[in-house]
Image (tube, rainbow, N blue to C red):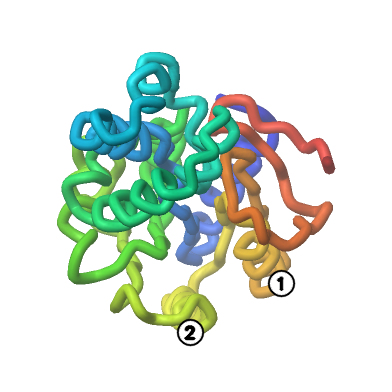
């Protein structure tokens, strides 16, 4: 199944179980297990439907833009397609923010290739599945649970937990510190982590140096720190490689 590095994860799970140790696998959600491209594209099309009479350049763009054109930031994605109207971009950003971080819109996300099958294989071998996400309680938890279940990820089967931000306003540092403390509280063995943000992947590597740490080469913050060369890089959950750059 998959590359040798994926098989390494499964073997480490089995080894921990044999030795009566709880294996934990940490999975980020946005741009790791799920692609947010469809969510961004849906928001863009809704914006076009409402405002194309005000911004004529949107009509043609709406017929050409595809999900693969959607990056980390919707405005940067449109700039890459030649949109320079600052008034349009600012209005679109406000429109996007009102929708992107909500329950209904996370249902537009698609799982990355192989993600459901791999997470299920980890769970079936005895791993605890630790879904860790910056999505927040009080606006995204219901949609997130439904998205996981609709896609077929293990959830209501025991040995699964979902750690969200307690509030939208919580700082990233406080959230990361809280998450690391919670992961350690299970007194198990972190076997592997999967992230798209280099900074978070680096943090996991430092916190759990004996685990395998995977960096998904999807999209990440433009201000992201440099990834540690020891991270295992991949585009999805089917064709993992061990290239260092």
Q: Which residue is mark 1?
A: 206
Percent position of residue 151, x then y: 26, 34
Image-based side of 33 in relation to 151, left or right = right
Image-based side of 229 in relation to 122, left or right = right
Q: Earlier in the sequence, mark 2 or mark 1?
A: 2
Look at the numbered disc 1 and give the secondary structure of its residue: helix
Q: Is residue 119 visible?
A: yes
**Residue 174, disc:** 2
Tell me where residue 42 sits by quadrant.
top left
Is the residue marked by circle 1 packed among few (<14), some (14-19), or many (20+) residues within 10 Å?
few
Q: Is residue 32 visible?
A: no
Task: From this view, report whether residue 154 is shown above or below residue 113.
Answer: below
Q: Residue at x 49, y 58 (%)?
A: 26
Image-based side of 239 in relation to 39, left or right = right
Task: From this view, report whether residue 162 is shown above or below residue 60.
Answer: below
Query: If the image is split into quadrants, where does the C terminus sit?
Result: top right
Q: Residue at x 59, y 45 (%)?
A: 9
Tell me where residue 119 sits by quadrant.
top left
Q: As rendered, which of 58 and 8 lies closer to the eye?
A: 58
């Amino acid at each position: 199944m998959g590359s040798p590095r994926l098989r390494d994860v499964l073997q480490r799970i089995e080894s921990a179980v044999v030795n009566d140790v709880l294996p934990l696998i940490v999975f980020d959600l946005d741009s790791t297990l799920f692609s947010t491209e469809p969510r961004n594209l849906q928001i863009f099309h809704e914006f076009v439907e409402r405002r194309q009479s005000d911004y004529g350049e949107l009509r043609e763009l709406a017929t050409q833009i595809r999900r693969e054109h959607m990056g980390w930031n919707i405005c940067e994605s449109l700039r890459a397609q030649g949109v320079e109207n600052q008034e349009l971009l600012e209005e679109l950003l406000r429109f996007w923010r009102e929708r992107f971080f909500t329950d209904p819109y996370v249902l537009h996300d698609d799982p990355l290739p192989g993600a459901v099958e791999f997470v299920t294989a980890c769970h079936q071998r005895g791993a605890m599945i630790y879904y860790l996400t910056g999505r927040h309680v009080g606006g995204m938890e219901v949609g997130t649970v439904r998205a996981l279940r609709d896609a077929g990820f293990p959830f209501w089967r025991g040995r699964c937990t979902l750690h969200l931000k307690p509030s939208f306003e919580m700082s990233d540092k406080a959230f990361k510190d809280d998450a690391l403390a919670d992961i350690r509280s299970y007194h198990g063995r972190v076997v592997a982590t999967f992230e798209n943000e280099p900074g978070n992947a680096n943090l996991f590597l430092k916190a759990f140096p004996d685990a395998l740490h995977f960096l998904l080469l999807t999209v990440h913050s433009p201000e992201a720190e440099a990834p540690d060369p020891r991270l295992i890089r991949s585009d999805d959950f089917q064709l993992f490689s061990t290239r260092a750059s």
